[in-house]
Every structure is written in C-alpha cells, then in structure tokens.
Amino acid sequence: MNLIELEIERETQKKDTNQQKIENLKSILKRGFVTFEDFQDSGRFIPTDKYEFEKNIAYIHPECRTIVRYMGGFVIQIMKSDAFVYMLKKDESLYVHMEDDGLAKMEQKVWDAVANEKFNKEKK
C-alpha cells in the first residue's frame, strides 16, 4: 500500500471523516503522482496537545506550539519562537532542518529532501 492509500485509510477511520479530503486523495491516487502543490495543500494545523503521534515522528520538541501535518504523515513543527522545524528519524539518524524564513520555505525543503521521493519513487 502506498502513502496515498494509507492516508485514505487513515482518513476513513476517523470519526470526523473529511469527504472532500478523501476525494482529493483519490484524485491524486488516480493521477499516479503527487505534486508539490498537492503536498503543500494537504497541510493541516494541529495544536500540539491534540496531535496523534505517528511512528515516523522522532519527537515533538518541548518548544513546539503547533504541528502542521501533511499527507503521508510528514510533520513540520512550529516553535514558540515562530521557527519551523522538521525532524525525521530514519534508520538510527535524526535529521533536523530549521528555518526562520517561513512555512513555505520549510515545505519546499521537506519536499526536496524526502517527501517527493517517498511519494513518487515508483514513477522514476
């Protein structure tokens, strides 16, 4: 099962299912690839205390005030200082990227560093 199929399954299991989100994900699945704009549009702001932890998240920084969760489980943390942090535990290494210049720049870094390859690896 690919990341989009997993995201559809995750969304359908929620008690407050978002049918529009499911339709968008099905459209992406049918098209066969994810664009940066699809990734960016999937971001949802979640207060840290409401976030349901996922296995790919290394940890939530104590200074994190808000989480932006993207399809596929990618997460950008917004710190109390308004800095943006992306952390991923991959193998036994912790990858940390920090950006003070805005969410869009951090989204582009995450897309370029890991998300594009994870979504579109079968198409290469």
Image: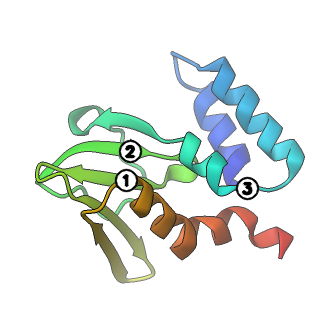
Lower sequence index among marks 3 and 2: 3
CA–CA distance between discs 3 and 2? Answer: 21 Å
Residue type beneath disc 1 = Leu
Quadrant of image for the C terminus: bottom right
Rendering quarter of residue 96: bottom left
Residue type beneath disc 3 = Asn
Which residue lies under the disc numbered 3? 2
* Foreground label between 3 and 2: 2
Q: Is residue 122 above or below residue 27?
A: below
- What numbered label is drawn on residue 22? none
Which residue lies under the disc numbered 2? 68
Which residue lies under the disc numbered 1? 103
Q: Is the Cβ of the residue at disc 3 closer than 8 Å to that at disc 1? A: no
Nearer-the-camera pick, 80 or 64 = 80
* Foreground label between 2 and 1: 1
Mark 2: few, some, or many residues within 10 Å (few <14, many ≥20)? many
- Residue 2 left/right relative to 77: right
Mark 3: few, some, or many residues within 10 Å (few <14, many ≥20)? few
Q: Is residue 55 above or below residue 70?
A: below
Q: Is the Cβ of the residue at disc 2 closer than 8 Å to that at disc 1? A: yes
Q: Is residue 99 above or below residue 54?
A: below
CA–CA distance between discs 3 and 1? Answer: 26 Å
CA–CA distance between discs 2 and 1? Answer: 9 Å
Nearer-the-camera pick, 114 or 16 = 114
Q: Residue 35's x, y, as percent?
A: 70, 55
